[in-house]
Image (cartoon, rainbow, N blue to C red):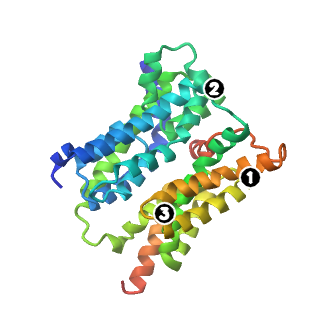
């Protein structure tokens, strides 16, 4: 188990470099929003999901909109349902407590690294967990370092820090592209999101755009049965990370 | 900036809520693996969701950032598309916005 964990940790180090880098961006934004380093660390350890944490920090304006924030996190992290389901073969025969313990530290990156290793040979849940511990440590170090630096920056907009959120999510979105079948859902999502942002208060545009866009393939299949192939499902962030490691 | 503000009930609730929801999805996906539809209506919906969610998050931000923001976002997207390196793309986008503002004497 320890040897497998060590292997998993080492295999995640290359991805870890970019995790640390955008973690430091999150830390800077958190400092600008007045989040304490302790709250940031609590988020890293208990939530451990980069995109959701970025959104929470973005929404972090007192009084905290807790219901809206929790719903946004639910929707953004919905992909973990698929990620969890895809790990079922790896966990076959393990106890409930083993599953419950290891799953907490599954993030996009160590999941992708584990799935890539799984295709090339035998991996264990120890490999997955080792990667998770490694990434969680790197993520925490990166965010806390950014938090320290962010508190020192006087004019964040001069360094385009206010644009960091948009840049990070633009980059992450590109990794989700699944090919031509995404054209219609993505156009619909963009239109719904912009319209909702204009006419509705708060952050409802995230949910409305995301759900509205994702309903397009459902209607396509409903109207033209058999004409809208879904292909193998699952977040295509794997391709992105897998290419990064190979 | 008091580190102890982490005990503020709002902060505790916000973090605990997000943590519970995220953990529930992680473990739920594994435990429900056989019952989750891989195709059909709900399967197609779940598969399309990661992309449409991230796009919805970012598009209004790009629109309100104006032409400079649009150019920067497009450059970020192209960089990530070509190099598959998220951090490099982010730095390019932020660099364009920072340079544009400096040039405009912002």
Report the residue at 27% width, 54% height from top: A147
In the figure, residue B34 lies in which quadrant?
top right
Image position of A142 (left or right of A225):
left
Rounded to the nearest angstrom, the CA distance separating label 2 from label 3 is: 36 Å
At mark 2, the secondary structure is helix
Q: Which mark identifies residue A181?
A: 1
Q: Position of residue A87 (x, y in %)?
A: 57, 27
- Mark 2 on the same chain as mark 3: no
Image position of A159 (left or right of B62):
left
- Residue tagged by mark 3? A167
Chain of residue at mark 1 = A
Chain of residue at mark 2 = B
Rounded to the nearest angstrom, the CA distance separating label 1 from label 2 is: 25 Å
At mark 3, the secondary structure is helix
The N terminus of chain A sits in image quarter:
top left
Image position of A222 (left or right of B70):
right
Please determine whether, in this image, residue A136 is positioned above or below residue B100. Answer: above
> How many numbered markers are drawn?
3
Q: Position of residue A173 (x, y in %)?
A: 57, 55
Mark toward the viewer: 2 or 3: 2
CB within 8 Å, label 1 to label 2 = no
Report the residue at 61% width, 34% height from top: A116
Rounded to the nearest angstrom, the CA distance separating label 3 from label 1 is: 24 Å
The answer to whether any part of residue A175 appears in the image is no
Q: Which mark identifies residue B35?
A: 2
Chain of residue at mark 3 = A
């Amino acid at each position: 188990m320890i040897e497998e964990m060590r292997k998993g940790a080492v295999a995640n180090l290359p991805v870890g470099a970019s995790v640390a880098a955008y973690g430091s961006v999150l830390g800077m934004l958190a400092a600008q929003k007045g989040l304490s380093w302790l709250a940031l660390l609590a988020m890293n350890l208990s939530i451990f999901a980069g995109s959701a944490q970025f959104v929470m920090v973005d929404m972090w304006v007192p009084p905290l909109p807790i219901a809206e924030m929790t719903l946004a996190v639910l929707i953004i992290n919905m992909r973990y349902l698929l990620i969890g389901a895809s790990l079922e073969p790896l966990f076959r025969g393990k106890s409930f407590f083993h599953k419950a313990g290891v799953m907490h530290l599954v993030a996009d990156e160590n999941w992708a690294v584990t799935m890539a290793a799984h295709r090339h040979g035998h991996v264990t849940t120890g490999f997955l967990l080792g990667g998770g511990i490694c990434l969680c440590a790197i993520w925490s170090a990166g965010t806390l370092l950014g938090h320290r630096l962010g508190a020192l920056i006087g004019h964040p907009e001069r360094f385009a820090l206010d644009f960091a959120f948009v840049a990070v999510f633009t980059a992450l979105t590109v990794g989700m592209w699944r090919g031509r079948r995404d054209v219609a859902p993505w156009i619909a999502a963009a239109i719904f999101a912009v319209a909702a942002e204009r006419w509705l208060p708060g952050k409802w545009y995230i949910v409305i755009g995301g759900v509205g866009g994702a309903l397009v393939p459902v209607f396509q299949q409903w109207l033209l049965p058999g004409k809208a192939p879904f292909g193998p499902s699952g977040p295509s962030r794997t391709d992105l990370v897998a290419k990064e490691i190979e | 900036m008091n580190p102890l503000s982490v005990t503020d009930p709002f902060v505790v609730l916000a973090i605990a809520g997000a943590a519970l929801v995220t953990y529930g999805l992680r473990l739920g996906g594994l435990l429900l693996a056989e019952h989750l539809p891989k195709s059909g209506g709900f399967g197609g919906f779940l598969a399309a969701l990661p992309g449409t969610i991230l796009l919805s998050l970012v598009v209004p931000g790009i629109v309100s950032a104006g032409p400079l923001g649009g150019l920067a976002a497009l450059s970020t997207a192209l960089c990530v598309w070509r190099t598959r390196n998220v951090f490099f793309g982010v730095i390019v986008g932020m660099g364009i916005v920072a340079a544009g503002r400096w040039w405009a004497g912002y």
